[in-house]
């Protein structure tokens, strides 16, 4: 029962690869390398450089490798970029995903797991977000993902595709064994940015918005370790293979940290007091996004192993040091 992982050379997708090969699952990776790195995929894993929007390519991969399940990670993910390039995000995240879903339906794929986002909730007033919290995305990124959710739900009703939708909160950290991590240049993830400042890759960093209605005026987010997130996908797949019906699941720990708290954690772990500049709010950023985390625990029996901000920061920091000392990511394998 071979699994196709789209975007498997990217940040989260590469951790999914590591998680599945650890239990001897047969997998194939499809990635166009626009944001991923082939060196993050172990050499023995079949890798195809290509576009999820190329239906003939996707169908040939499914048929050639006997694919039974698709885990779809390939997407553009930078919220501020989506504000300036909305059509690019709708093309890459929505239109091409439609083609991928169509290929899955036409080839009889049974199980489809989609990498969605808490950005679909937008600027919700909910203190803690559940899967029933109304969706109201405030960025093209969030809208592009919500549209894919709708397509999958419609395809499930019309064609019997079993679709699981995982809405991520803020993914952070890196593989504890140092085999993968967030490697994209110009990444805007808070913990990565702060870690880059701590190792001197950038001269300090900026905090966008200090006037939110939060304890210290900065945004609150629920940070989930990428390895815990990968395991949530594996448990989802096991659940579906056992006959479970796909649904929507929030992926978070159920508690949040402010931007300033995260920066202080990075300074404490690294021992470096890097400069921080306070700036105005950034378009598309909701004030607070924190999950309850109850449904995924009860349905899948998922329990986090890395629910500790210091641990998340330490793994991310070690990965930044590996990147600093490695001229090419391909040397990691």
Image (cartoon, rainbow, N blue to C red):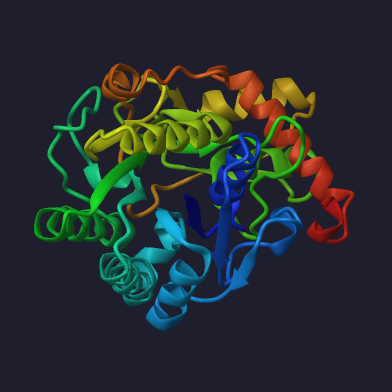
Q: Locate residue 307 relative to residue 314 in the image: left or right.
A: left
Relative to residue 186, is residue 162 depicted above or below? above
User: 65 or 295: which is nearer to us?
Assistant: 65
Number of marks drawn: 0
Residue at (73% x, 22% y) in the render: 269
Q: Locate residue 81 relative to residue 176 in the image: left or right.
A: left
Residue 122 showing in the rendered view:
no
Residue at (81% x, 60% y) in the render: 330
Relative to residue 331, is residue 170 depicted above or below? above
Residue 179 showing in the rendered view:
yes
Image location (x, y in percent) of residue 181: 67, 44
Relative to residue 302, is residue 71 depicted above or below? below
User: 306 or 67: which is nearer to us?
Assistant: 67
Residue at (54% x, 23% y) in the render: 261
Q: Quadrant of residue 225?
A: top right
Image location (x, y in percent) of residue 280: 42, 48
Image location (x, y in percent) of residue 73: 45, 55
Relative to residue 251, is residue 152 depicted above or below? below
Q: Locate residue 270 relative to residue 238 in the image: left or right.
A: right
User: 260 or 297: which is nearer to us?
Assistant: 297
């Amino acid at each position: 029962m071979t699994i196709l992982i789209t975007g498997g050379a990217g940040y989260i997708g590469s951790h999914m690869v590591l998680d599945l090969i650890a239990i001897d699952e047969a997998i194939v990776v499809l990635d166009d390398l626009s944001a991923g790195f082939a060196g993050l995929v172990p050499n023995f894993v079949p890798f195809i450089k290509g576009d999820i929007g190329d239906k003939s390519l996707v169908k040939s991969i499914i048929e050639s490798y006997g694919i039974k399940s698709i885990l779809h990670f390939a997407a553009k993910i930078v919220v501020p970029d989506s504000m300036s390039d909305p059509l690019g995000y709708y093309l890459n995240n929505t239109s091409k995903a439609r083609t991928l879903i169509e290929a899955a339906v036409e080839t009889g794929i049974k199980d489809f797991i989609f990498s969605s986002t808490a950005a679909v909730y937008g600027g919700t007033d909910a203190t803690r977000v559940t899967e029933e919290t109304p969706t109201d995305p405030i960025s093209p990124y969030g809208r592009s993902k919500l549209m894919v959710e709708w397509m999958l739900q419609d395809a499930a009703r019309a064609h019997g595709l079993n679709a699981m939708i995982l809405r991520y909160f803020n993914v952070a950290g890196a593989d504890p064994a140092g085999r993968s991590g967030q490697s994209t240049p110009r990444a805007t993830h808070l913990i990565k940015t702060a870690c880059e400042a701590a190792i001197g890759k950038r001269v300090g960093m900026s905090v966008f918005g200090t006037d939110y209605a939060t304890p210290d005026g900065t945004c609150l987010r629920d940070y989930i370790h990428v390895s815990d997130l990968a395991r949530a996908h594996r448990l989802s797949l096991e659940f579906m293979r056992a006959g479970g019906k796909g649904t929507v699941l929030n992926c978070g720990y159920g508690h949040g940290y402010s931007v300033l708290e995260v920066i202080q954690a990075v300074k404490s772990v690294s021992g470096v007091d890097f400069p921080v500049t306070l700036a105005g709010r950034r378009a598309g950023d909701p004030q607070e996004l924190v999950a309850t985390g109850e449904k995924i625990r009860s349905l899948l029996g998922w329990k986090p192993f890395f629910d500790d901000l210091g641990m998340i920061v330490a793994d991310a920091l070690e990965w930044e040091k590996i990147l600093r000392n490695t001229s090419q990511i391909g040397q990691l394998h």
